[in-house]
Image (tube, grey):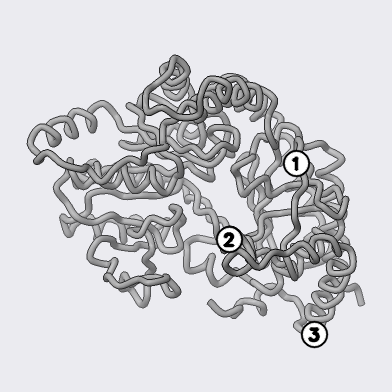
Amino acid sequence: MGDHSTGLSGVDPARLAAFRAAEVAAFDSANPVSKAAQAPEFLGGVPMHWMSDWPTPFPLLVREAKRAVLRDIDGHEVDDFCLGDTGSMFGHSPAPVARALKAQAARGLTYMLPTEAALAAGKALTETFGDFLWQIATTATDANRFALRVARAVTGKPKVLVFNGCYHGTVDDAMVVLDQGRTVNRLGLVGQVTDISTLAVSVEFNDLSGVEAALAQGDVAAVLTEPVMTNSCMVLPEPGFLQGLRDLTRRDGALLMIDETHTQSSGHGGYTRVHGLDPDMFIVGKCVAGGLPTAVWGMRAAVAERFAAYNETRPAGHSGMGTTLSANPLQFAALLATLREVATPKAFAKMEKGAARLAKGLSAAITEAQAPWHVVRVGARVEFICAPGPLKNGTEAARAHAHSVEAAVHLGLLNRGSLIAPFHNMMLVSPVTTNAQIDRLIANFRTVLAVLFPKD
């Protein structure tokens, strides 16, 4: 997608180019060790392709991370508000998780059998997120993929309804968009040879009439949605929208699947518990085990009964679900420690308070700069959006993205000691993030805006 929205941001292109050039030069000068250490052995120079998507001339190499601070190999300390893009939302290596992993590592890493910690983790999952029957995966992508198989199995229907601009990891079925009212494959997919619209239908977020029309076709097995659109310019649900999804799916025989991989930030038990949602299936990943790769997915008892009946009739053979290293004892050790000792109501209350402080400060800076931007917050998750708001759906969110502006702001903040998520303008406040770190980020943001929006 081109950077067609720079105009909405109100930033003068020439001023932006000069600021970006100065920040690139400053970063290059300040990080000679990271620059010299780049290795050609990895494809594209990085072990995962998106590591080159940061708005820096080259990636920083991290030496260590503690609490909410990164230390790179050039010796810089950086306040970390990215926190592994939610994976370390409770801070880096929380002590209870580190202790649990160390203890389990001495007893074995994986053996394809459950442990006592696994049984306790199941109880803790239900106590935290609600009354579901659980399964464990390694990533939320896997969890969503497996849950979709169950949804299709129990309904006998082929399609999943997803929202335009949605984020559900790299699930193939969700890689569709709306183009002039038609569901089509997203542009840019690598090696894509099938027409995903045979498996999915895309509707705009907050459009209940569009959902109703799609469900009326009778071929939708499930509506898969985040309760808040993330991994884009964040879009909040309008009043009644999520309840409307619940009512429509019940009426038309589709399952409602809530993916809370990013919206765990909403509070203890995620958005679903905080706002009293009632999905048929529930998916959560990233930080659920304190940063160790883990995801969980669960189904209501009624869905489990239908799935059991389906299993009795299907031919013997591979289900297409599950991976060998999923549900390993390390995951359960970290999961149990996180749910019992880290992701507590007290921790979320502290995160909420800090995030409110951050959102208030960023909003004040935007007002002072007279920038046509706005701030959105969902619990501990805060985003500034370089366009007027609020936004209603994925089309508006895509239009609001000002990629060159965002990249320059991100780099300007990093050069001043504040790291935010690279793919959008997301900032997380952890239980160990200090007010001093929050205030530094606000001050750095104000400094950057003063350059981009100078007073006459």
Mark 3 → mark 2, Cα distance in angstroms: 24 Å
Q: Residue at x 22, y 42 (%)?
A: 319
Q: Which mark is residue 65?
A: 1
Mark 2 → mark 1, Cα distance in angstroms: 27 Å
Q: Of label 3 and label 2, which has the lower sequence position?
A: 3
Q: Of label 1 and label 3, which has the lower sequence position?
A: 3
Q: Which mark is residue 14?
A: 3
Residue at the spot of label 2: 233
Residue 183 in percent (x, y) is at: 31, 70
Q: Residues within 10 Å of mark 1 (few under 14, many from 20)?
A: some
Left or right relative to 299: residue 32:
right
Residue pushed farthest right?
456
Q: Which mark is residue 308?
A: none
Left or right relative to 313: residue 143:
right
The secondary structure type at the circle numbered 2 is: loop
Left or right relative to 241: residue 9:
right
Residue 189 in percent (x, y) is at: 42, 70
Mark 1 → mark 3, Cα distance in angstroms: 37 Å
- Looking at the picture, which amino acid does disc 2 mark? Cys
- Looking at the picture, which amino acid does disc 3 mark? Ala
Answer whether labels 2 and 1 touch (C-beta < 8 Å).
no
Establish if 148 lies above or below 210.
above
